[in-house]
Image: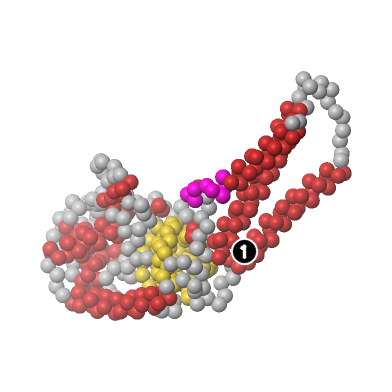
Amino acid sequence: MSLKSKVKGLCLLTFAMGVNASVSADTRYNMTEGVTDISKSVFQMHQNALYIVIGIGVVVFGAMFYSIYAHRKSKNPTPAQFHESTTIEIIWTIIPFILLMFLAVPATSTLIKMYDTSDADITIKITGWQWKWHYDYLDEEIEFFSNLSTSQQKIRAKLDGGEALSYQELGENYLLEVDNELVLPINKKIRFLVTAEDVIHSWWVPDFAIKRDAIPGFINEAWTKINEPGTYRGQCTELCGKDHGFMPVVVKAVTEEEYVQWLADKKQEKIEAAEAARLAALQSWDKTKLMTLGQSVYEAKCAMCHGVNGEGGIGNAITGSVVTNGPTDAHIDIVFNGKAGSAMQAFKAQLTSAEIAAVLTYQRNALGNNVGDLIQPADIEKLR
């Protein structure tokens, strides 16, 4: 067999191995194929581009290595003298043009589809907050916040000097768990309006091939139509602050019947929660009850910024704070209305009056503070 035949055979074998490896590779090391028609189109374009790149690489490097070997100085001490070949010029112009058209036509078609949000069955407004998502079903008058549900104790275990938790203890979905999932029906076109309350975020779900920046004062659009029921996870993919990595996205896709039932349950839950909040605001709570509820609210909503033990972090320390130990009205105002120009959010829409009263009482009587006064839900209800 001639050297030329051997090199040609090696090139073909290398190409076949590259294609086979790209197809059979573990999906953890490849792009997510996803569960929507758009995501599958994007995945296929990625695979096509990969095959072309592998082919180009094999041809170019094969030709280069062959030339280095077959035309080395020891074999051909006198180099050939030639230049300008019209045929070669035409060939290496036409072939890249054909390859680019092979990639550009499906890419353009997919992009047009990705940005066509017309004729949607459901519209959901997504608002990014530090460090949570707010979902508003505009056609159903349902809205809620979606927070990371992984406990701060688990996150900070190693930082506090404790023994690092194992993978089994952390769980498969560590830092990808939320208290309220975004529930969507399958086989329905869902339009998303994406914005932000404070800084720039980015809503990303790989299985849907959706990644949209959430920018304060702007609305970006996206849409999806999910083909398969299941739970799909994503994250904020814009560096939105120190705890940017604690802002997951969890979408639960269900059948249309399950979605209708979920909507009914959610609306009933909203009515019951409003009535429970109203009744709670009318009661006079004792210190034990306020402190117990306040601790749970603090750990879920405040510890990420102010520290598990009130030591501070992104936000100011609670321990010894002039706000926490100062006038009650000022403390209530900053928690209820937030503080402009800072990461301190307004919690009036996120927490009930009882929860705000409880967490304020907890901050003033725990975490190294001992002011002694109690704040009742009725005090917060007056501000509404």
Give the residue drawn at x 61%, y 43%: 18
Give the residue drawn at x 55%, y 77%: 119
Q: Is residue 20 above or below residue 331?
A: above
Asked whether 84 or 144 is in front, the reply is 84
The residue pinned by badge 1 equals 110
Instruction: Give the residue at the far front of this rendering.
Output: 1
Local crowd size for mark 1, using a 10 Å CA cut-off: few (<14), some (14–19), many (≥20): some
Magenta span? 21-28
Q: Quadrant of the N terminus?
A: top right
Give the residue drawn at x 58%, y 46%: 20
- Horizontal side, residue 76 vs residue 333: left or right: right
Asked whether 36 or 364 is in front, the reply is 36
- Residue 363 is situated, as x and y percent measured from the top left of the image, at 21, 58
Instruction: Tell me, yes or no, whether the highlighted magenta stretch contains residue 329.
Output: no
Q: Quadrant of the C terminus?
A: bottom left
- Residue 147 is situated, as x and y percent measured from the top left of the image, at 35, 61
